[in-house]
Amino acid sequence: MRFFLQEEYRGRSEVNQDCLGTLTRFDSCKTLPFAMHPLFESADSLTAHIISAGIEVHKDKGPGLIESIYEWCLLRELEIRQLSSETQRVVMINYKGFVREEPLRFDVLVERCVLVEIKSVERLLPIHQAQLLSYMKLLNVPVGLLINFNVSKLTDGVIRLVLPSAGRSSRVDLGSSPVKLDD
């Protein structure tokens, strides 16, 4: 079963444009309704500001540097724009009755509702999207940005992911530390 992202279907004639509040399942060509994540609207409006901050960093630094430099610069640019951000968090992972506390090493979580994964690679691979989606599920974050700084024009290196099922279960309490996960 393969699920596709909203961004992959915007404007395509074979997709019902009223399905922006649905997850499209292509092995059966059905749409499945879902409840919108409570942070989706905030996250959706923030992505333009985050991409703009990334463009500012890219204009100043250009392509070809290591990811940690872009991450540090993006954190400073978000700070200048008065957007809160964090880079790591300890989570409690429960698996079949076993519990483990683990530091999660995501790149940048902005305003607790947009997860940004920074890359500086020749091209983005499906595993990069899979990693971001896994982190989004784990943190229950509705929107993610995968930003590859190793491009001539930054907007060519941005992929926006939406996690429609993030609102179905409240798996993570973002207001406390460590974060607790249910089975």
Image: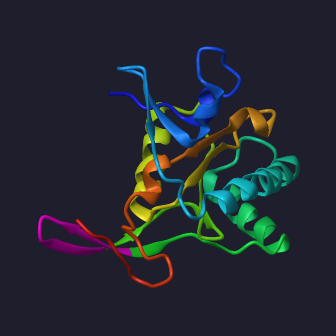
Is residue 98 visible to the viewer in this orientation of the structure?
Answer: yes
Q: Is residue 170 left or right of residue 164?
A: left
> What residue is drawn where x is 83% and y is 52%?
52
Between residue 49 and residue 67, name the one nearer to us: 49
Left or right of 152 on screen, residue 97? left
Q: Is residue 139 left or right of residue 154?
A: left
- Which corner quadrant of the image does residue 32 belong to? top left
Image coordinates for residue 80, horizontal then vertical, percent: 84, 72
Asked if residue 122 shows in the view, the reply is: no
Picture quadrant where residue 13 is located:
top right
Going 60% across and 28% down the picture, which residue do you hit?
8
Q: Residue furthest top?
A: 14
Quick one: 147 or 64, which is closer to the camera? Answer: 147
Q: Where does the image place residue 79, in percent across and percent down from the top left? A: 78, 73
Q: Residue at x 77, y 50 (%)?
A: 51
Left or right: where 8 falls relative to 29? right
Q: Is residue 21 magenta?
A: no
The image position of residue 41, as x and y in percent, is: 67, 58
Q: Position of residue 98 (x, y in %)?
A: 13, 71
Residue lying at the far left in this picture: please name it. Answer: 97
What's the magenta bit mostly, secondary-structure-wise? strand
Along the viewing direction, whichever of 3 and 54 lies nearer the viewer: 3
Question: From the viewer's perspective, is residue 64 above or below residue 84?
Answer: above
Q: Where, quadrant-wise, is the C terminus in this rendering?
A: bottom left
* Relative height, residue 134 to residue 152 (above, below): below
Residue 94 in the magenta stretch? The answer is: yes
Residue span colored magenta? 91-101
Q: Nearer the viewer, residue 21 or 96?
A: 21
